[in-house]
Amino acid sequence: MEAMKVQTAEGFALQLVTNERKKGILGGFGIKERLEPTAYVCPECGLIRSYAERDESE
């Protein structure tokens, strides 16, 4: 599997919006956490799997 960047036709990166509030002042305003998915593609069969990696240090 090879990692590839996922983006829209307009060039914007896709984001996943969680139900969890962001940490800090933005979370106080109700802003939700956003994750960027990474797509892994099999070069042989074309299977695509997307994963949203969370930063566990926060």
Image (cartoon, helix red, strand yellow):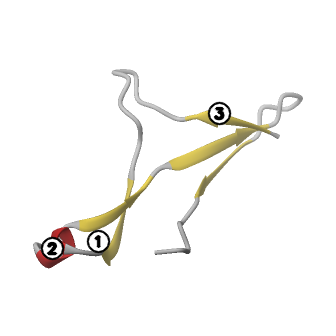
* Mark 2: few/some/many CA within 10 Å (<14, 14-19, 20+): few
- In what quadrant of the picture does the N terminus appear? top right
Name the spot of residue 2 as percent of width and height, x first: 78, 36
The correct choice, above or below, for 50 with respect to 30 in the image is above
Q: Secondary structure at mark 1?
A: loop
Q: Secondary structure at mark 3?
A: strand
Q: Which mark is residue 22?
A: 1
Residue bearing the label numbered 2: 30
Which quadrant would residue 5 be assigned to in this image? top right
Q: Which mark is residue 6?
A: none
Q: CA distance from mark 3 to mark 2?
A: 31 Å
Which sits earlier in the primary sequence, circle 3 or circle 1?
Answer: 3
Question: Which amino acid type is shown beneath numbered disc 2?
Answer: Gly
The correct choice, above or below, for 57 with respect to 37 in the image is below
Residue bearing the label numbered 3: 4
Which sits earlier in the primary sequence, circle 1 or circle 2?
Answer: 1
Look at 82% across and 36% down and name the residue there: 42
Look at 38% across and 23% down and name the residue there: 11
- Assess whether mark 2 and mark 1 are in contact (beta carbons under 8 angstroms): no
Left or right: 37 as drawn, with respect to 9: right
